[in-house]
Image: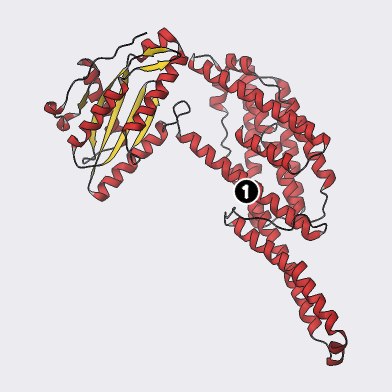
Amino acid sequence: IGGARSAINQYASLGVSEAESVALQDVKKTLDYYEAALLLTGSMINEGAAPQQIDQAVSVNDSSALRGLAALKSEVSAHHTHGDRTIGKSRIAATLRADIGYGGMIHAFKNYVLRQDDVLAISVREKLTSARAQIEAYRALGATRAEDLALEDIADTMNAYEKALTRAEELTRENKTPEEIDEQVKVRDDSALRGLGVLDREIAAQAEKTALEVSRTLDAVVALLSVTTWGTIFLIMGLVGGMMWIMQKLVIHPIRSMTDLMTRIADDDLHLDVEGTDRPNELGEMARAVAVFKENAIRRDKAEREITHLTLTDALTGVANRRRFEVRVQEAIQLCDRLKTQATLFAIDLDGFKQINDTFGHHAGDEVLKTVADRMLHVTREVDMVARLGGDEFAIILVGLDGPKDAIVPAQRLIEDIEKPILVDGTKMRISASIGIRNFPVEGDSVDLIQRQADDALYSVKKSGRGSFAFYGEDQDKDAIENTAPSAIAG
């Protein structure tokens, strides 16, 4: 949603017609609806609602956004026509993305699995037909070997979705639930996404090649002009000098600059300016095409970084999620083996959190979790990692320790900080934490083993009174452990 709003602002900053302004407003309104629906979806998921119940409650009508996108495409086509084959391929690739993605085949397929509406199945087949037509149109412009392979990957994915749709219709007739249908008709999109990425790179490479050919031709013309008779040179020396200066400044230099720009953009150097976009000629068209390619590359890079961040971060607290936690434990094992140091895993469970949720509601529980996560970050170092594994379960990885005793002070500070009152909507709440500690690595350690044994130490704390910490197995140093006050809630 954030990336889409950024794209709308960038589009508007280029100067828009009345029709484009209305179209952008339609798209923006649909984004607002989706943002509100996203919040409601998260709440219903936490309450254990079924997918169909959630879909009925948060269904968003996309028609205005799709009309807006169609209007934008029409406006761009009306004002930016060009016979260049590279530009034609770029537009076909953009249309192919639209047929596959938002408002396209995959969008309709997911909705059919969820809602089992025959109209959506018809839409899937229409988008498949359109996407295949775009593939053939692309090939008609002359495809390289890499482009052919990319188009085959995209076509194979289209075929897989067509088979999956047929299977989904059979399961629908058998009155299967959306969950049962989804389990049997999953399709991996990786090859198609890679194929679209290859098309982008090939289009950029072909644009660069075209620019180089033009540059060589102009160089040959300049060289030919210098091979004249001495008499002609004396007669037209001033004219030739002026023409060469003009061609060098206004043609050859701009083309070489754009060639260098395209090379740098292809190498992911996106912090550069594209000049010459205001020229009312073919060089201006080429510069505008390079500018569009740069903006697309920036948006793709930003989207990839945002997706990577979202997949590794807990949405509520902003700390690492379980997936990033497991990767970090494995990295810590390897680092400790290499540097001959120790690391420690804290398995943390909040005592009394369920009572807060039951008494004050999920909003209060969420605020408590966010405050606890902030306190954990405050206690730990930048080299350590705080992760939320789910519910009120947290974990902390501390690296660069000399031994088990180095973990005692952080554990005590963590328990003391978490026990401090938390103010939510004017109400003071108290909570405590139980911590199971496992030092690693030892011979035969794995991520699952380390986490399981830290949990064992945690359970021993909860059985013995909570609000304290304990080491696992031989790491346990009972003389060094001091019990903290039990958890409590105060209004």
Q: Nearer the viewer, residue 354 or 183?
A: 354
Q: Secondary structure at mark 1?
A: helix
Give the image location of residue 55, x and y in percent. 61, 18
Which residue in the structure is indicated by mark 1? 297
Position of the N terminus, as image quadrant, is top right
Residue 475: tell me if it is visible.
yes
Q: Is residue 453 visible?
A: no
> Residue extending furthest left?
479
Q: Seen in the image, is 424 located left or right of residue 435?
A: right
Amino acid type at image mark 1: Ala
| Visual colour scheme | secondary structure
| Position of the C terminus by quadrant | top left
The residue that appears at 73% across and 39% down in the rendered structure is 12
The one nearer the camera, 78 or 149, is 78
Question: Which residue ends up furthest to the front in the rendered image?
Answer: 426
Q: Is residue 246 above or below residue 197?
A: below
Q: At 22% across and 32% down in the image, what residue appears?
A: 409
Quarter of image, res 408:
top left
Label 1 packing within 10 angstroms: few (<14), some (14-19), many (20+): some
The residue sitting at 74% across, 51% down in the picture is: 89
Hey, which quadrant is residue 312 in on the image? top left
Q: Is residue 236 left or right of residue 402?
A: right
Viewer-proximal residue among 474 and 418: 418
Q: Residue furthest bottom?
A: 230
Looking at the image, residue 43 sits to the left or right of residue 286; the answer is left
Locate residue 148, reporting x and y percent.
66, 52
* Residue 399, image x, y percentages: 28, 41
In the foreground, 34 or 380: 380
**What residue is at 75 percent from the left and 72 percent from the top?**
248
Q: Is residue 111 above or below residue 106?
A: above
